[in-house]
Amino acid sequence: MEDNTNKKHTRTLILLIVNTLLFFVVYRVLLYYAAMSDNTLGSFVVMVVYLFLLLGFVLAYLIYNRFFYRRGLTPEQLPDDWSAEQKTEFLADGERRMARSKWMLLIILPLIVTFLFDAVDLFIIDPFFRK
């Protein structure tokens, strides 16, 4: 059982790395193409599209998981007039939603890393090392 879990975590990590590289390379290539063609609007559009992708997936993740209000709840914290089955189903639904939406993190995290690298390049590398 533990070996299967390790394989799943390894596969997820590999997918995360591949997605991060893919998102970052496509982002930088599009920005480079816009810079080489002296198209400031193109650079702006690329950044805005990536930003809207990030915001869209983050909002979808939060809304689908109902802003995580079910996370960490115990049956004792739920209304007393609910039956045990209702409480169990309520808590199980929260866990199912978390499990079903994990794939969105494979898009959200690479987009965050892409913007992080871009910010480091823009605000640290450019001003201090490219004078």
Image (tube, rainbow, N blue to C red):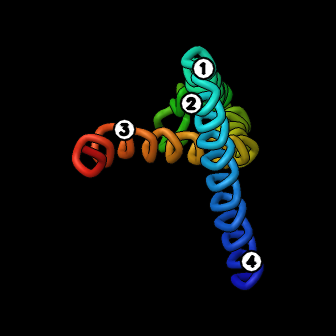
Contact (Cβ within 8 Å) of mark 2 with mark 1? yes
- Eyeballing the image, is 95 above or below 2? above
Q: Which residue is mark 2?
A: 35
Marks 4/2: CA–CA distance: 42 Å
Contact (Cβ within 8 Å) of mark 4 with mark 1? no
* First in sequence: mark 4 vs mark 1: 4
* First in sequence: mark 3 vs mark 4: 4
Residue at image point 68% right, 28% down: 64
Q: Judging from the image, what secondary structure is the residue with disc 1 in?
A: loop
Find residue 121 and report its image quarter. Answer: top left
Contact (Cβ within 8 Å) of mark 3 with mark 4? no
Q: Which residue is mark 4?
A: 7
Viewer-side residue, 125 vs 12:
125
Q: Amino acid at mark 1?
A: Asn
Marks 2/3: CA–CA distance: 14 Å
Mark toward the viewer: 2 or 3:
2
Mark toward the viewer: 4 or 2:
2
Q: Amino acid at mark 3?
A: Leu
* Residue 2 percent across, percent down from the top left: 69, 82
Q: Amino acid at mark 4?
A: Lys
Mark toward the viewer: 3 or 1:
1
For residue 122, which numbered disc appears in the image?
3
Residue at image point 54% right, 27% down: 67
Q: Judging from the image, what secondary structure is the residue with disc 2 in?
A: helix
Q: Which residue is mark 1?
A: 39
Check the image and name the residue furthest to the bottom.
3
Residue at image point 77% right, 79% down: 4
Viewer-side residue, 83 vs 17:
17
**Mark 1 crowdedness (10 Å alpha carbons): few <14, some 14-19, many ≥20:** few
* First in sequence: mark 3 vs mark 1: 1
